Image: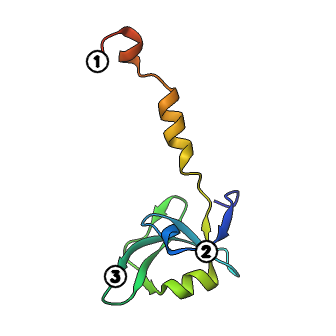
């Protein structure tokens, strides 16, 4: 995960469930859980070596996330374009409609 590019959190629309976040001053990586409206914050889980640890979580406010964390930069258009360019095996055989 050290090679991934992290960017500042500028908008709440970036805060989606499953996003990887990291503290600005720390190297620990976390996975963002769902938003809890009763507690007015996001559930954050520790994340290491591709494993999310569900046995421990904290609630972090949106303001704190924007001020003290950065989010993994992901190009959301890449999977859509790649999927559109790769024909399925059934299509190339003429079996798919």
Which label lies toward us, 2 or 3?
2
Which tag, 3 or 1, sits closer to the chain's start?
A: 3
| Quarter the C terminus occupies | top left
**Vertical comparison of 10 with 83: above or below:** below
Kindly identify the residue that appears in the image at 40 percent across and 18 percent down.
Answer: 89
Q: Estimate the x, y position of residue 85 in percent, counting from the top left.
A: 52, 27
**Vertical comparison of 1 with 64: above or below:** above
Q: Estimate the x, y position of residue 39 in percent, counting from the top left.
A: 35, 90
In the image shown, does 78 or 53 lie closer to the viewer? Answer: 78
Secondary structure, mark 1, is: loop
In the image shown, does 49 or 16 lie closer to the viewer? Answer: 16
**Vertical comparison of 18 with 43: above or below:** above
Residue to which mark 3 is pinned: 36
Secondary structure, mark 2, is: loop
Estimate how packed mark 2 is, as few (under 14), some (14 to 19) or many (20 or more) residues with alpha carbons within 10 Å.
Answer: few
Kindly identify the residue that appears in the image at 41 percent across and 72 percent down.
Answer: 33
Q: From this viewpoint, which residue is outermost toward the bottom?
A: 39
Residue to which mark 1 is pinned: 97
């Amino acid at each position: 995960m050290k090679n991934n590019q992290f960017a500042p959190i500028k908008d709440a629309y970036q805060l989606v469930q499953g996003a990887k976040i990291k503290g600005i001053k720390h190297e620990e990586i976390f996975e963002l859980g769902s938003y809890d409206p009763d507690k007015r914050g996001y559930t954050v889980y520790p994340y290491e070596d591709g494993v999310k640890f569900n046995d421990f979580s904290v609630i972090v406010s949106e303001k704190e996330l924007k001020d003290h964390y950065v989010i993994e930069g992901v190009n959301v258009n890449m999977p859509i374009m790649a999927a559109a360019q790769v024909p399925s095996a059934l299509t190339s055989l003429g079996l798919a409609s």
